Image (cartoon, rainbow, N blue to C red):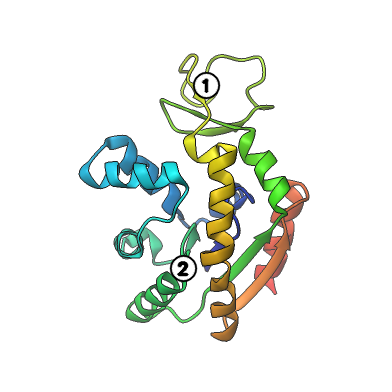
C-alpha cells in the first residue's frame, strides 16, 4: 500500500504515519525528519536547510525531490510506504508522479487530515523536542519530568524554531498558498483522496483513516 499523508503542519501527520507504519508494516518516510537530521549534522546541505526551516519556508523542490527519490528506491519500499510531508508543491507532485511511473507504481492513496489554523497553532506551540534524540513530546507528556523518556537525557527539552508562533503562522501561510493546491492536482489526476477531520482523538482519526483505506 502506498499512502501520502497530506495536511497542514501540526495536524497530526507524523503521529498517524507512525501508527500506520506499525499496523501495515511499511516504512514511514518523513521528509521533515530527514531534513532536520541533515541540519543537525551541519553538512553544507544541512546548514542551508537549517536557515530555511528556521524561517518556516519550504525547502527548494530540487532538494526535496532528490531526497525522496533516493529513499523510495530502497528495498524496504517495495511493499509500500507512507509519505509524510511530501509533496508540498505541484512541481513536487508532478515529479513524484514521474518517479512512481518509473517504479511501475500505479496506485497511491492521499489522506488529507484537516484542522483549523488556531488549533494547529495551539498544538505546535505546546510541543517540545529533545536536543539529544530529536523525539517530540507535548507539554503534557513531559510535565514534571527532566529526563527524556526516549533517550534519558536530562534537561534536554526545548521549543524548536519551527514551532514558535511567528514561524508557525508563516508555515501555515506557505501551506495555504503553495501546498493546499496540491489537493486539487490529485483530484484532477483521479487519485483516491480521502479527507479526515483531525480534531478528534488520535485513535479515532486512525480508525477513520484505516476505514478510508479499506474502502
Residue in front for this viewpoint, 175 or 191: 175
Residue in front for this viewpoint, 91 or 96: 91
Q: Is residue 208 left or right of residue 57?
A: right
Please name the residue shown 35% across and 41% down the image. 37
Q: Secondary structure at mark 2?
A: loop
| Residue 185 badge | none
Q: CA distance from mark 2 to mark 1?
A: 35 Å
- Give the image location of residue 105, x and y in percent: 42, 78
Looking at the rendering, which quadrant does residue 53 occupy? top left
| Residue 89 badge | 2
Q: Residues within 10 Å of mark 2 (few under 14, many from 20)?
A: many
How many badges with numbers are in the image? Answer: 2
For label 1, the residue is 148
**Mark toward the start of the polypeptide (2 vs 1):** 2
- Residue 18 in view here: no
- Give the image location of residue 151, x and y in percent: 46, 23
Nearest to viewer (mark 2 / mark 1)? 2
- Give the image location of residue 9, x and y in percent: 57, 51
Please name the residue shown 50% across and 15% down the image. 155
Q: Is residue 147 left or right of residue 114?
A: left
Amino acid at each position: 500500500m502506498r499512502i501520502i499523508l497530506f495536511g497542514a503542519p501540526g495536524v497530526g501527520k507524523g503521529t498517524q504515519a507512525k501508527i500506520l507504519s506499525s499496523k501495515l508494516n511499511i516504512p514511514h518516510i518523513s521528509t521533515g525528519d530527514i531534513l532536520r537530521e541533515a541540519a543537525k549534522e551541519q553538512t553544507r546541505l544541512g546548514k542551508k536547510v537549517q536557515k530555511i526551516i528556521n524561517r518556516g519556508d519550504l525547502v527548494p523542490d530540487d532538494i526535496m525531490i532528490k531526497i525522496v527519490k533516493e529513499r523510495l528506491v530502497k528495498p524496504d519500499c517495495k511493499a509500500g510506504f507512507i509519505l509524510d510531508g511530501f509533496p508540498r508543491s505541484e512541481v513536487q507532485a508532478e515529479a513524484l508522479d514521474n518517479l512512481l511511473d518509473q517504479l511501475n507504481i500505479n496506485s497511491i492513496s492521499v489522506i488529507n487530515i484537516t484542522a483549523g489554523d488556531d488549533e494547529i497553532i495551539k498544538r505546535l506551540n505546546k510541543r517540545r523536542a529533545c536536543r539529544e534524540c530529536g523525539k517530540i513530546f507535548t507539554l503534557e507528556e513531559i510535565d514534571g519530568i527532566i529526563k527524556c523518556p526516549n533517550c534519558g537525557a536530562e534537561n534536554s527539552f526545548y521549543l524548536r524554531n519551527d514551532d514558535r508562533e511567528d514561524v508557525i503562522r508563516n508555515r501555515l501561510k506557505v501551506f495555504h498558498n503553495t501546498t493546499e493546491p496540491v489537493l486539487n492536482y490529485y483530484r484532477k489526476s483521479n487519485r483516491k483522496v480521502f479527507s479526515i477531520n483531525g480534531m478528534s482523538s488520535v485513535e479515532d482519526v486512525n480508525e477513520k483513516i484505516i476505514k478510508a483505506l479499506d474502502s
